[in-house]
Image (spheres, helix red, strand yellow):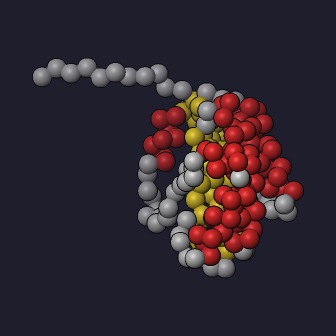
Amino acid sequence: MSTTFQTFPTFDAVVQTTTIIVNTTEQVAQLTTLHAQHIFDLDPLLPGQSSMWIVTPPTFTWSISTIFPNASITSATAALAPFMDGVNSLGFTPVASGTIVQNINDVLGAAMTDSGGLLGVIGSRLWPPQAYRSNATAIGNAYKELLDTGVPM
């Protein structure tokens, strides 16, 4: 048997991670509304982004990972700056934040490794793009309502 596989060139990516801890679902709504208001700021760089809320009463921990293919740290940081400035203006400070350049094969390999057996729900855009464009506040309120009713995010 003989086979041929198509391969694609590898590339570097900027990986930015941020973790924020808040105490109320009202604060969750503030942050997710802000995120919805700024999500399209990233589009020119074509990143992938996922986020996960981990509920550990009495706190809510939000982990956001953004992967910018073929980007520089400068351009990735600039794209995220309006959102991060908004986080700070709301009075929140990330408990962890990091930005690195890494080969995409290593990034994806690490993302697919479940080294700790963490149980959680990872979401990207749970609602259609038009909802983000037309009513960012509804996105924040939806997260609040889901968490208020006990739905794990």
Looking at the picture, tell me which residue is in the foreground, 42 or 112: 42
Q: What is the count of numbered marks?
A: 0
User: Which residue lies most toward the left here?
Assistant: 1
Looking at the picture, tell me which residue is in the foreground, 130 or 78: 130
The image shows residue 112, relative to residue 106, as above or below, that is: below
Do we see residue 137 in this rendering? yes
Q: Residue at x 84, y 56 (%)?
A: 88
The image shows residue 85, relative to residue 153, as above or below, that is: above
The image shows residue 23, relative to residue 32, as above or below, that is: below
Q: Residue at x 63, y 53 (%)?
A: 64
| Quarter of the N terminus within the rendering | top left
Q: Residue at x 71, y 52 (%)?
A: 135
Q: Position of residue 9 (x, y in %)?
A: 47, 21
Do we see residue 17 in this rendering? no
Q: Position of residue 121 (x, y in %)?
A: 50, 61
**Is residue 93 rendered to the left or right of residue 47?**
right
Q: Residue at x 68, y 65 (%)?
A: 141
Looking at the picture, tell me which residue is in the foreground, 105 or 91: 91
For residue 16, which quarter of the picture?
top right
| Quarter of the C terminus within the rendering | bottom right
**Is residue 103 rendered to the left or right of residue 101?**
left
Q: Position of residue 95 (x, y in %)?
A: 73, 61
